[in-house]
Amino acid sequence: MSVKTEELRLVSSEDKRELAARLARIEGQIRAIREMIEREENCELVTQQLAAAREALSKAFSELIARTIERNCTEGKMADPAAKAKLLMMVRILTRYV
């Protein structure tokens, strides 16, 4: 059984707003890093900011995946409460550690 990509989407406008805000902050971080490079700032400071931006983007990725799983796999579609609880546990792990 295959699932069409268009079926997996963020369905909440709150999710969309939160993701857009997160990406706007990351965009600001990237812009600031470019400016640091143009000013020829210390390499360690630049790499610290790059690492922070990379972590922020990784967090956005895991949040997007977790929200998509929640919205598409747990809202009224799973009859087995134990399976639903396990899936939600995995979503929490994903957002915390990935």
Image (cartoon, grey):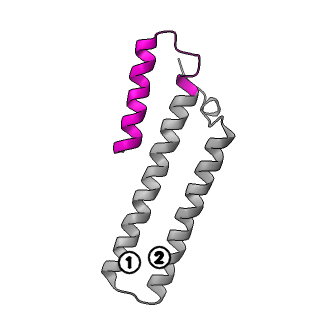
Q: Find residue 55 and report its image quarter.
A: bottom left
Tell whether 22 sits left or right of 49.
right
Highlighted magenta segment, given as a residue range: 72-97
Secondary structure beneath label 2: helix
The relative height of residue 1 versus residue 30 in the rendered view (above or below) is above
Taking the spot 46% from the left edge, 90% from the top edge, the residue there is: 39
Q: Position of residue 98 (x, y in %)?
A: 36, 45
Identity, as a three-letter code, of the amino acid under mark 1 = Val
Identity, as a three-letter code, of the amino acid under mark 2 = Ile
**Residue 17 tag number:** none
Taking the spot 53% from the left edge, 23% from the top edge, the residue there is: 73
Magenta-colored stretch includes residue 20: no
The relative height of residue 5 versus residue 31 in the rendered view (above or below) is above
Secondary structure beneath label 1: helix
Q: Which residue is mark 2?
A: 33
Could you tell me how far apart the alpha carbons at marks 2 and 1 are, in whole angstroms? 6 Å
The relative height of residue 36 versus residue 25 in the rendered view (above or below) is below
Q: Earlier in the sequence, mark 2 or mark 1?
A: 2
Q: How many marks?
A: 2
> Mark 1 and mark 2 in contact (Cβ < 8 Å)?
yes
Magenta-colored stretch includes residue 92: yes
Tell whether 71 sits left or right of 63.
right
Taking the spot 48% from the left edge, 37% from the top edge, the residue there is: 66
Magenta segment, prevailing SS (helix, strand or loop): helix
Taking the spot 55% from the left edge, 63% from the top edge, the residue there is: 25
Q: Which residue is mark 1?
A: 46
| Direction right: furthest residue | 13
Q: Position of residue 21 (x, y in %)?
A: 61, 56
Q: Position of residue 78 (x, y in %)?
A: 52, 14
Mark 2 neighbour class, 10 Å CA radius: few under 14, some 14 to 19, many 20 or more: many
